[in-house]
Image (cartoon, helix red, strand yellow):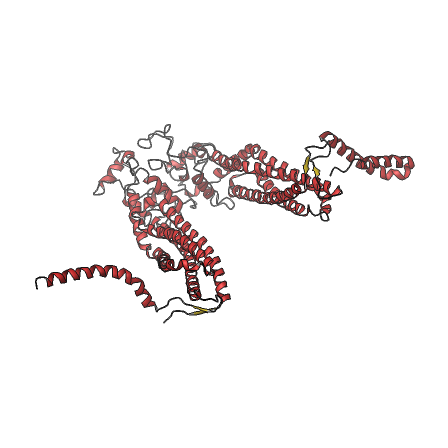
């Protein structure tokens, strides 16, 4: 039983071909847009590559770029096919091309949808990547003399200033890490000796944060050190002070930023997906309508167009059969040899 | 003898009209570009409005915007004129307008040139304006509770972080000003009392800077306080420390930024001047060639186009004579009734003289 049969008189076929030609050029531009969006996302992710522990999230922009390039090719061929469609002499040469063309096009269109779904599904992976990356960044903040880590301080400082955030979850992450290098500590001073003795690992821990955590909107000059000590500063209450330093954690700030970016891009790619789908559906209708005309003397008759000749399940089996036969063929050969060996002794 | 005379066959006239039509639309785009440039520059200047004391520098973007709009209009008129130019019935109505159009086009070119010159000449005024504005900003840094000044702290902090600069000339400007508000000073403390007594005005001065002066590129955590005391910090030498704070002053940073912006627009403006001049010259050629063709018996024949009918000196003398005649007319008219026929004859002679040279436009 045929899926979605529609009647196509001659005029309707002509209109379909013309509309499809315009639509396919729009879809080409849309494909280029998808590629550009993928590049944009990739660039933004790479800018903060130093605070991400792994690159799992990069699969989203990579997929978008591949789909964008593929859709340029798909829509170019679509426009060529519908240019030739109304010409009975030129249309038959596309005959063998169309079946694999539709298979490939459907695959890439579905891939586009997958990219959108992935951009939402991978939020957790992005968060854990940022958590590990920021933890390392904060830990290696003081190692400005270690090759390979000497830019961590500058990266974390600029990140905190740009995204208006402090620490990993919040500013207290800085209390648990020694972020002042030993090169700048006077080990003969009592204060330093006390602090180092006060914890097991012998680290110099302070209840202070770097200057990049300071909030410019605060009405008072920034208080960076002795944050938990109310008596250390005049007119200061640790519990109620809100504007002094940034209260938001950098992980949350970065996740919000990237999810916002991916949501915007996802909305655009969804509309491009719908456009691409409509191009493929129209092309299928045009192809089936024109195939019914082939060989007839009067090319202006009314024909029927359909999406699938058989039902959905049968069509899927039809496409998968070659793949399965390829695999089954191997099995058939093995069965044959097994049969021979069993019959030989008998 | 005419200035820069050229022969124009019918084909050439048609080509000139078509080329000029395209060129005038290009000039319309250029006018739009100049307008957008002016808007952009204006927005950039307005963003840092709080650290500028006067708005003299705003004459550059204002001029750019006016000239942009005027040139869109003028070049649109030019395209209409050359659309009508090959139609003998529609062209004459533009004749009178064209003299005014030339004046407007020349004025626009001069204004654009003036903009380029001004953008260099006003650098000193910009620096002065920034100097005073920044000095006020630094002085009112602590007044976050005074209405009208409560955003100075945030403005100066964000400015120093964005432009990577500290203070007016350099970071030492912060040593001369009390930038910590009295609300956050413990007047019972000995240190505070000493500092306040140590100067005439009773201000709390310290050798420290706000956090926004800190340089993230420094290998050590930022040192903000007791900067001049090498013993106050371990492994610290005041004279040789370079990376701790930003060494550039904000006045220098902002001046460099705005000068860079205006210099980069220079080549664009110069090329727009060239395009406008070429539209002007082509329009003149088209006008004279078409008028010459209309005066011929066979309108499809060859005509001559020129920039000026006589050479520069003769044209100047003509214009001078015309202007004087106009003045004479204005003076003679009230007196002519009393003067009688003699004056009338002189006036007639003058009108004849004015009429004999063929119209230069």
Q: Quadrant of residue B126?
A: top right
- Name the residue at the bottom extreme: A1
Q: Position of residue B168 (x, y in %)?
A: 47, 34
Determine the residue positioned at 48% across, 63% down: A16
Q: Position of residue B84 (x, y in %)?
A: 68, 47
Q: Position of residue B180 (x, y in %)?
A: 43, 40
Residue placed most toward the observer, A110 or B252: A110
User: In this view of the protein, can residue B198 be seen by the observer?
Assistant: yes
Residue placed most toward the observer, B31 or A324: A324
Q: Position of residue A281 (x, y in %)?
A: 42, 63
Determine the residue positioned at 89% across, 37% down: B344
Left/right of residue B64 with respect to residue A50 in the rendered view: right
Q: Quadrant of the C terminus of chain A?
A: bottom left
- Name the residue at the left extreme: A345
Q: How many marks?
A: 0
**As drawn, A107 above or below B323:** below
Determine the residue positioned at 35% across, 39% down: A154
Q: Quadrant of the N terminus of chain A?
A: bottom left
């Amino acid at each position: 039983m045929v899926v979605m049969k529609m009647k196509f008189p001659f005029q309707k076929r002509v209109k379909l071909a013309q509309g499809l030609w315009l639509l396919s050029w729009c879809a080409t531009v849309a494909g280029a847009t998808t590629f550009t969006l993928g590049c944009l996302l990739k660039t933004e992710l790479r800018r903060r590559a130093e605070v991400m522990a792994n690159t799992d999230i990069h699969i989203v922009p990579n997929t978008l770029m591949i789909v964008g390039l593929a859709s340029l090719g798909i829509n170019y061929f679509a426009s060529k096919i519908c240019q030739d469609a109304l010409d009975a002499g030129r249309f038959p040469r596309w005959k063998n091309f169309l079946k694999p063309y539709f298979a490939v096009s459907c695959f890439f269109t579905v891939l586009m949808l997958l990219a959108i779904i992935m951009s939402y599904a991978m939020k957790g992976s992005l968060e854990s990547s940022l958590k590990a990356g920021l933890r390392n960044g904060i830990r290696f903040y003081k190692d400005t003399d270690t090759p390979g880590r000497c830019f961590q301080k500058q990266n974390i400082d600029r990140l905190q200033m740009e995204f208006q955030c402090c620490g990993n979850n919040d500013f207290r992450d800085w209390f648990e890490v020694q972020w002042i290098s030993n090169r700048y500590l006077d080990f003969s001073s009592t204060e330093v000796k006390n602090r180092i003795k006060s914890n097991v690992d012998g680290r110099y821990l302070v209840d202070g944060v770097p200057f990049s955590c300071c909030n410019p909107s605060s009405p008072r000059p920034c208080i960076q050190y002795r944050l938990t000590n109310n008596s250390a500063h005049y007119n200061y209450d640790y519990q109620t002070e809100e504007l002094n330093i940034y209260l938001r954690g950098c992980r949350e700030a970065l996740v919000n930023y990237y999810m916002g970016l991916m949501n915007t891009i996802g909305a655009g790619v969804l509309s491009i997906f719908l456009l691409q789908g409509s191009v493929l559906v129209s092309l299928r209708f045009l192809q089936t309508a024109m195939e019914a005309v082939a060989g007839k003397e009067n090319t202006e008759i009314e024909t029927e167009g359909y999406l699938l000749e058989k039902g959905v399940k049968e069509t899927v089996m039809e496409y998968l059969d070659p793949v399965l036969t390829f695999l089954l063929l191997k099995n058939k050969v093995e069965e044959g040899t097994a049969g021979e060996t069993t019959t030989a002794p008998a | 003898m005419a200035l820069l005379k050229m022969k124009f066959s019918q084909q050439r006239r048609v080509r000139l009209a078509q080329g000029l039509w395209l060129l005038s639309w290009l000039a319309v785009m250029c006018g739009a570009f100049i307008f957008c440039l002016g808007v952009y520059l204006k927005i950039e200047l307005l963003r840092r409005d709080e650290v500028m004391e006067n708005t003299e520098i705003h004459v550059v973007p204002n001029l750019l915007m006016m000239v942009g709009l005027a040139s869109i209009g003028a070049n649109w008129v030019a395209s209409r004129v050359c659309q009508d130019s090959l139609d003998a019935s529609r062209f004459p109505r533009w004749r009178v307008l064209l003299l005014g159009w030339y004046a407007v086009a020349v004025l626009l070119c001069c204004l654009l040139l003036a903009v380029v010159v001004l953008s260099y000449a006003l650098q000193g005024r910009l620096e002065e304006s920034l100097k005073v504005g920044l000095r006020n900003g630094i002085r009112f840094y602590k007044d976050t509770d005074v209405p009208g000044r409560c955003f100075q702290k945030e403005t100066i902090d964000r400015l120093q972080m964005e432009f990577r600069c500290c203070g007016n000339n350099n970071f030492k400007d912060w040593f001369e000003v009390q930038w910590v508000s009295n609300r956050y000073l413990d007047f019972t403390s000995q240190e505070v009392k000493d500092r306040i007594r140590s100067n005439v005005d009773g201000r709390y001065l310290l050798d420290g800077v706000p956090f926004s002066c800190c340089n993230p590129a420094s290998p050590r955590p930022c040192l903000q306080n007791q900067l001049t005391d090498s013993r106050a910090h371990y492994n610290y030498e005041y004279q040789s420390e370079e990376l701790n704070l930003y060494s550039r002053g904000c006045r220098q940073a902002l001046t460099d930024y705005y000068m860079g912006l205006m210099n980069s627009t220079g080549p664009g403006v110069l090329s727009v001047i060239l395009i406008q001049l070429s539209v002007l010259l082509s329009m003149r050629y088209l006008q004279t060639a078409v008028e010459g063709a209309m005066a011929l018996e066979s309108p499809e024949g060859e005509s001559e186009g020129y920039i000026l009918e006589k050479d520069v000196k003769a044209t100047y003398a003509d214009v001078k004579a015309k202007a004087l005649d106009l003045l004479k007319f204005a003076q003679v008219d009230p007196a002519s009734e009393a003067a009688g026929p003699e004056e009338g004859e002189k006036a007639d002679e003058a009108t004849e003289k004015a009429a004999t040279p063929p119209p230069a436009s």
